[in-house]
Each structure stands twice: as C-alpha cells, then as structure tokens.
Amino acid sequence: MTKTLLGMTKTLLGMTKTSLGMTKTSLGMTKTSLRMTKGALGMTKAALGMTKGALGMTKAALGMTKAALGTTKAALRMTKAALRMTKAALRMTNWVLLECLNIDLVRHSWERDALADVLFAGDPGDGSFDAESESAVRD
C-alpha cells in the first residue's frame, strides 16, 4: 500500500508540476496580451489626438470661411452703394449736359419714377395756348 501511495504521490507531483508549467505559460501569455493592449491603447490615444487636431483645424478653417463670407458680404454692400452713387452721378451729369446744351427733351406721360417732375416745370407766362373755339350748340 505504501508503494501505491508513493506512486500516487509521484503522479500528483507530476500533475502539479505540469499545472505549474501551464500556469507560468498562461502568465506569460497574459503579460504579452497586457503589453499588446497597452500598445493598442497608446495607438488609440495617438489616433484620438490626431482626430482632435484635425477637428481643431476644421473648426479654424470654418472660422476663416465665415470671416471671408462676412468680408464678401461687406464688399457687396459697398459695391451696391457705389453703383447707386454712380447712377446718381450719371443722372446729374446728364441733367447738367442737357441744361448746358439747352436741350429740351420730350417727356412722355408713361415714364415715371414716382417723383414729381419739377426740373422742367413750365411758366404759364411763357406762351399762349392754341385754343380753337367750338360751338356747343347743335343744329
């Protein structure tokens, strides 16, 4: 019986050694996996930092685009004002030329700009009407 117990003890000791070897291997694999996980975490952090940088650059580009749009709008407003001033100056130049050359333009009744035409208003004493009398009584 002692031999049997001794044999069983040796078998258990062998099994324990094998189990210990497997535990050491598992521990090594766990350490390797942990190092790989840390590396992957570092790469993820780097990618996140790059993404944040790209987002910051995108926001800056958007801000610059908005500023350029505002400048363009202001330039358009200034251009419109300059066009209105140019139109007014052309009207005044036309009027001055007509007055200097003493040209009397024919004014049509359908050409209106909703303003009273007082520049060329006539004086009733300048001329007489060509009135022809007609009889109001019928035969």
Image (cartoon, rainbow, N blue to C red):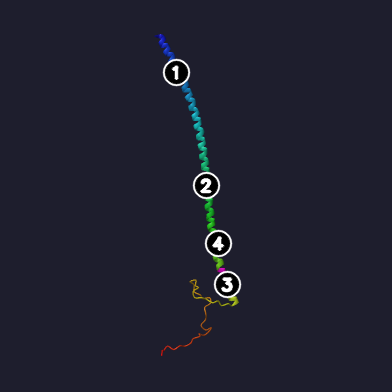
Mark 1: few/some/many CA within 10 Å (<14, 14-19, 20+)? few
Numbered label attached to residue 79: 4
Which residue does the numbered mark 3 point to in the structure image? 94
Q: Position of residue 88 (x, y in %)?
A: 55, 68
Secondary structure found at label 2: helix
Q: Amino acid at mark 2?
A: Thr
Q: Earlier in the sequence, mark 2 or mark 4?
A: 2
Q: Is residue 99 above or below residue 8?
A: below
Q: Position of residue 24 (x, y in %)?
A: 48, 23
Q: Position of residue 91 (x, y in %)?
A: 56, 70
Mark 4: few/some/many CA within 10 Å (<14, 14-19, 20+)? few
The N terminus lies in which quarter of the figure? top left
Q: Which residues are magenta?
A: 88-92
**Main structural element of the magenta stretch: helix, strand or loop?**
helix
- Label 1 with label 4: CB-CB less than 8 Å: no
Secondary structure found at label 3: helix
* Distance (Cα) linking label 3 and label 4: 22 Å
Which residue does the numbered mark 2 point to in the structure image? 58
Instruction: Looking at this view, name the residue that lies furthest to the front.
Output: 139
Which residue does the numbered mark 1 point to in the structure image? 16
Q: Amino acid at mark 1?
A: Thr
* Distance (Cα) linking label 1 and label 3: 114 Å
Instruction: Looking at this view, name the residue that lies furthest to the bottom.
Output: 139
Q: Amino acid at mark 4?
A: Thr
